[in-house]
Image (tube, rainbow, N blue to C red):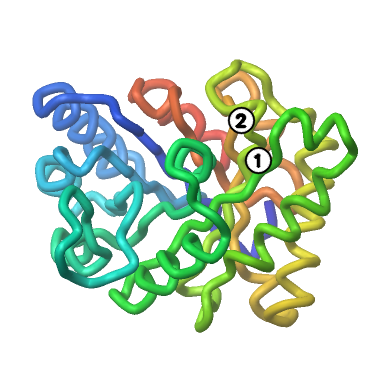
C-alpha cells in the first residue's frame, strides 16, 4: 500500500443473498464502521441488484459505499433485463464493477464493451472498477503481463482520472478456487498495471489510481497482500459473504 492511496475493500456478493440475510450482513458491517471507524481504508458493498435498495438503506450514514456489479452502456432503452448506470446512480450507488472475468467469459464481453460500460458509469457520476486478469493457460504460457496490459489499454475509459477509476486485477485461475497469487506475483502484475496506466494516462493518474487485488482474498492472506507496494485494497468475492471475514480483511489495512 502507498500512503498517497487510501485502500478500498470492495465486496462483490455476485449472485448470492436474499433480502433478510443481505440486509443483516450490511447492517452488521455498518455497525462496525460506525463504532470503529475506517481511518485506514474505504469499504464498498456490491450486492445483487435485487438487494441494492435494502443494502443501501442498511449502510446509510455509515461511511460504507454502495456499488453495482455491472451496467449497460446506454442510459435507458429497450434492453430487457439490463440495468443502466443512471439507474444505479439513482439508487445512490457510487461505484460499479465492469469487465469482471465472469462477465467476460460467461457473456462474451470484450475490451471495447467494457470500455463503453466504464464510460457510461463515469457519465452517470460514478467510479468504474475495471477488472482485468489472465487465465491459467495464459499464465502458464508466460503471457500474463501482456494480457493484463492489453486489457487495460483496451478497457480504459475516456475521461478516466483518479476520482472515477479503479483497476482490479483478478487472476482468473484464482477466483473462487482457493488459490491466490504469491505476493511477488501479485506485486509484479500490479507494477505492470501501474506502468501501463502511466504510459496511457500519465503519472498523475498512475500514481494515484487504486489497483485492487482479487482472487481468493481471505483473512489469512490479506495482510501480506495489502502490504505490497502497488496493492491498494481488494475486490473480495466469497469472503465478503461473511461479515467477520470481510471485516478482518479490511482490518488488514490498518
Q: For mark 2, does the 10 Å Cα neighbourhood hold few (<14), some (14 to 19), or many (20 or more) residues?
A: many
Residue annotated with mark 2: 222
Residue beneath the point at 23% across and 49% down:
62
Which quadrant holds residue 59?
top left
Residue 219 % position (x, y): 55, 22
Residue beneath the point at 31% across and 52% down:
67
Residue beneath the point at 45% across and 72% down:
164
Residue annotated with mark 1: 226
Which quadrant holds residue 34?
top left
Decide if residue 188 is on the left or right side of residue 193.
right
Say if mark 1 contacts mark 2, CB within 8 Å.
Answer: yes
Decide if residue 8 is on the left or right side of residue 168.
left
Labelled disc at residue 50: none
Residue 254 % position (x, y): 55, 42
In whole angstroms, how far apart are the C-alphas of marks 1 and 2?
Answer: 6 Å
User: Does any portion of residue 254 appear in the rendered image?
Assistant: no
Q: Is residue 140 above or below residue 5?
A: above
Which quadrant holds residue 191?
bottom right
User: Does any portion of residue 149 appear in the rendered image?
Assistant: yes
Decide if residue 113 is on the left or right side of residue 27.
right
The local secondary structure at tag 2 comes to helix
Amino acid at each position: 500500500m502507498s500512503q498517497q492511496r487510501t485502500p478500498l475493500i470492495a465486496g462483490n456478493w455476485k449472485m448470492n443473498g436474499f433480502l433478510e440475510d443481505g440486509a443483516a450482513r450490511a447492517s452488521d458491517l455498518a455497525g462496525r464502521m460506525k463504532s470503529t471507524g475506517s481511518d485506514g481504508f474505504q469499504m464498498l458493498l456490491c450486492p445483487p441488484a435485487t438487494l441494492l435498495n435494502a443494502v443501501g438503506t442498511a449502510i446509510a450514514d455509515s461511511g460504507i459505499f454502495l456499488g453495482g456489479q455491472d451496467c449497460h452502456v446506454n442510459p435507458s432503452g429497450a434492453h430487457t433485463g439490463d440495468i443502466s448506470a443512471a439507474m444505479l446512480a439513482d439508487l445512490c450507488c457510487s461505484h460499479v464493477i465492469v469487465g469482471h472475468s465472469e462477465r467476460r467469459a460467461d457473456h462474451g464481453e470484450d475490451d471495447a464493451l467494457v470500455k463503453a460500460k466504464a464510460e457510461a458509469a463515469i457519465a452517470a457520476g460514478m467510479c468504474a472498477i475495471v477488472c482485468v486478469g489472465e487465465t491459467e493457460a495464459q499464465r502458464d504460457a508466460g503471457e500474463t503481463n501482456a494480457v493484463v496490459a492489453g486489457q487495460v489499454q483496451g478497457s480504459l475509459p475516456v475521461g478516466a482520472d483518479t476520482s472515477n477509476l479503479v483497476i482490479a486485477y483478478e487472476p482468473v485461475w484464482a477466483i473462487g478456487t482457493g488459490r491466490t497469487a504469491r505476493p511477488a506475483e501479485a506485486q509484479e502484475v500490479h507494477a505492470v498495471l501501474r506502468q501501463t496506466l502511466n504510459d496511457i494516462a500519465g503519472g498523475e493518474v498512475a500514481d494515484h489510481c487504486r489497483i485492487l487485488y482479487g482472487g481468493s482474498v481471505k483473512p489469512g492472506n490479506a495482510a501480506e497482500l495489502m502490504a505490497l507496494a502497488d496493492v491498494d485494497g481488494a475486490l473480495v468475492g466469497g469472503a465478503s459473504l461473511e461479515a467477520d471475514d470481510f471485516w478482518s480483511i479490511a482490518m488488514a489495512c490498518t
